[in-house]
Amino acid sequence: MVEKLDVQQGTLALMILRTLQVLGPLHGYGVARRIEETSRNRLSLNYGTLYPALLKLEQEGFVTAEWRQSENNRRAKFYSLTAAGRRQVAREAREWHKTADLIAAFLAPPKEA
Amino acid sequence: MKYIRASLARIAGFFTGNRQDDDLRDELLGHVEMETAENVRRGVEPHEARRQALIASGGLAQAVEAVRDQRGLPWLENITSDIRYALRSLRHSFAFTAVVVVTLALGIGANTAIFSVVRGVLLKPLPHRDGDRLVYLRHSADVPGGANISFSVPEVRDFRAGAPSLGGIAEYSAWTGTLHGDNDAVRIDIGLVTGNYFEVMGLAPLLGRLTQPSDDGHGVPPVMVLTHDFWLKRFGGDSGIVGSRVRMDGTSVAVIGVLQPAPFFPVRVSALTNMVVSPHHLSAQMVESRDHRMTEMVARLAPGATFEQAEAEVVTVAARMHSEHKESYDPASRDRVTVIPFKEALGERARLTVWLLMGAAIFVLIIAAANVTNLTLMRGVRREHELVVRAALGAGVSRLRRLLLVENLSLSLLGAGIGVIVAIGGVRLLTSFAARYSPRANEIRLDATVLGFTLALSVALALVLSLIASIPKEGTFASISAGARRLTGSLSKHRLQRALVVAQIAVSVVLLAGAGLLTRTMLRLSEVDTGLRSEEVLTLPVPLLNPARISPAADAESKQLYERMRSEIKALPGVIEVGVGSTMPLRSSMIALEVKAEGKAPAIGEATPHADLRAAGPEYFRAAGIPLRAGREFAATDEPGSARVVIINQAMADKFFPDDDPIGQRIAWMGEVLKFTPFSGDWRTIVGVVGNTQDGGLDARPTAVVFMPFAQEFAVGGGLVIRADSNVAALAAAATRVVRRIAPTVPLENVLTISQIKDESVSPRRLNAALVSSFGLLAAIIAAVGIAGVLAFSVSARTNEIGIRMSLGANAARVQWMILKEGGVLLAIGLVLGIGVAFFSTHVIQGLLFGVAPHDPTTLIGVAMVMAAVGVVACWIPARRAAQIDPVISMRSA
């Protein structure tokens, strides 16, 4: 069994936005499944984490939500990315790359002079 | 932008919460179903599939709560429901609520009331413009009555010239005058002031104008400024009084204005006038003699000057005075001048008493808070179950804390509300109490600052109460089975409760020790022998001679009037003896002069001896009940033309003639000041010695007194001493009528019996003792409730254990002893701690004690015994309850 990680503060929003960007409109279950799969089950999301995060994105205007029929004829709330959301993904991704590079540079084994 | 949008969404969410809840539930259930379906597809049996889905969700209730927090304004939303819930739960545990609220109300009420006094009397900014820049100069020396000997005009001039840091120096001289109305006359205290006085003090007129430098000097018309209180009292706040004229001591004086309300200093006065009102104050004697000290100095720091600069300059000027005018400063008397901030000078007499009461009130509040804390802790243990259930239903730790905070806030604010009502009653009482000590007592108010203090106090209390309560930790609730019944708190909480009980007892002991010392002071004081043999004595001061206009003719006339009054009052039924004298017994003489005895040189380095000057008629000693120790009393033959004789008191005899018989020896007045008095420095023969009397108050040491025959000297002061066989107070009206008939315009005030005069010394101490004692009692009662409560709780928590013990053979007595011991240990620790603290802290009230040492062992032991008795009774009640536990019932119910 793989060790499960808690979702790091601030990263969940980007994961959700990116998921919606890649897969298009999706319900909460779909988002959770996708994040778990992408993390190869290293992340576990409970509802108390996921749904407040979705609501927060909705309040900030990065996603919209509407009730629709799901693939197997069930009524579900679908979340989709807005234009602002798309811009936000790009911005946050850039920042993450920068941060990651920076941290990588720090963690790289020291070069022999 | 993102935040604005999110905030708007949240505010909208606050109002649409209920509709969205349904939505959310559908969404979450949909999630569970999709996950269940997925699990089933993977081959899990349907029931198990749903179970796994629910576990993975991490709790639907918690999720709903988390989303709600994100959605609306959870803070506002929860507060309203928290308040509603808190009030409901407090109503349900009514006994708890009542006890807590009453305890807090008493503690907060006492603090509010006393704090209003502290603020009004000590802290509030002065009404004077830039009152912080005002300083008072005090001239003192180690001679009798030398704590404040005032300044002479040449000394004031020295400071004006030598202390530039004092931007303005105003002179003030206490004086009394008789104000004649249309059909009465009142004696009023007035302040003679220089024209710059009000400018220096930074006071403004309410009506008219104040004195100014043009009102100084000779030949100017006499003018008067009324103080606000006197204007209201005497003239009914009539604004027409400004510009009119009043008659004072036979002179017409113009009323030029009414002063804004301001504290009186150094004494309460009715009016302030320019110096010309008293011819004496402009005389060469007054203006030129360095030893004629009748002036107080108030100064304002110059712009930019600091208090320290002023202090240094004043010390320099004083040192120069001492070296340049050696004849005026006795080196043995350690003559010195100190600078005191005016505000401190105003609060000086009140400070110790007021802070003592504030300390006592804070102690009461500490005990009350400890009690409430204990009650809350016990309730908290009983509520642990409830809190666990709430946590399991999705309430987060912060939510639970907030709920507790709201509950405690409701409690403390309720207590504060009632406390303020208590304080309103208390403030009225305390104002009259404070008026004895402070000229600022009329500034005592329950104003916004005081109420702010009360509010801050109650919020702080609520915060403390909420922090100590235990709350299930995040995540722990799952491990606590909801069905478990836990009545015992954790060990550490028990320890906290016990520590609080110990602290309560200790603090109560300290308070009771203070109360005990003050009570003993009061008792000691009322036991003091006044030196008079009887209390059936009435004193009737009748000041006939105007001190500013003494003449032989006026003197002779007034002596005739005194004699007429004396003989007519003597004829009243019940009167045994009537005497005439310059000063009433148990009142300090206004005149103290340097004195010498023939053939006795004072020891080198010893301050020049002073004695009080009094005059007495032949019957005075018998009427007052002052015992004759040796020689004879004055006789009718001690007339103006006959040999000059005096009678001295025991203190005087001990000082000058410790080894030989004073009768027949000669003494004389001396010193620079003598020439300003109508008394001569001739040798006078001692013909008698009388006992000491407590003229400076019951707590003062007897001073040396020289009595001169009333007939031989000017009748300054003047009054009648009346002795009756019983109920002398009833004679006051008849005696006053006689005086009124003979001298219709003389102001009659302070017509008092000896026991009333005595009470003037005792009653402030009685109030002190009563206030601190009531705080002490309150503390002891609250502490007793505290210890009983903690033990009762311990008993109820140990019911099961006690049942087991009893079924194993422990009898009722043994169980009772066990509980008593539990309380007894706390009691003993508290007592020892309290006595220890009291032993080291009571010296701070030394200044308020009389005839009892701060470490008085009798008081400390007595207090400990009282507290022990109260404590044992408090332990007894729960111990008895423990002994009555029925083992069968207690074990079955467990």
Image (cartoon, helix red, strand yellow):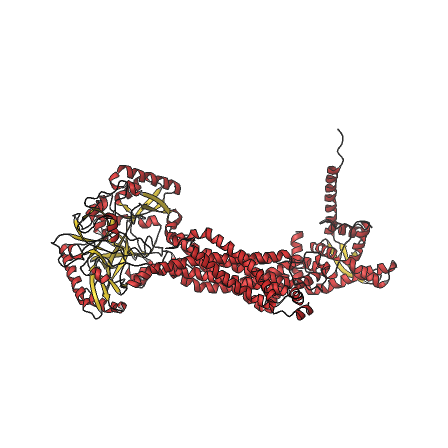
Seen in the picture, residue B541 relative to B836 is either above or below; the reply is below
Residue at the spot 55% in from the left edge and 67% down from the top edge: B98
Rendered location of residue B197, percent (x, y)? 31, 49
Image quarter of the C terminus of chain B? bottom right
Identify the residue at the far left of this view. B641
**Which image quadrant for residue B881?**
bottom right
**Which image quadrant for residue B530?**
bottom left
Residue B450 in sight in this render: no
Of residues B243 and A30, the one nearer the viewer is A30
Of residues A34 and B732, the one nearer the viewer is B732
Identify the residue at the far top of this view. A113
Residue B347 in sight in this render: yes
Of residues B127 and B639, the one nearer the viewer is B639
How many marks do you count on the picture?
0
Q: Is residue B42 left or right of residue B561?
A: right
Rendered location of residue B61, percent (x, y)? 72, 62
Rendered location of residue B327, percent (x, y)? 24, 40
Q: Is residue B55 left or right of residue B630?
A: right
Rendered location of residue B802, percent (x, y)? 64, 65
Q: Is residue B146 left or right of residue B614?
A: right
**Which image quadrant for residue B96?**
bottom right
Q: Is residue B234 left or right of residue B841?
A: left
Of residues B453 and B21, the one nearer the viewer is B453
Seen in the picture, residue B225 relative to B169 is either above or below; the reply is below
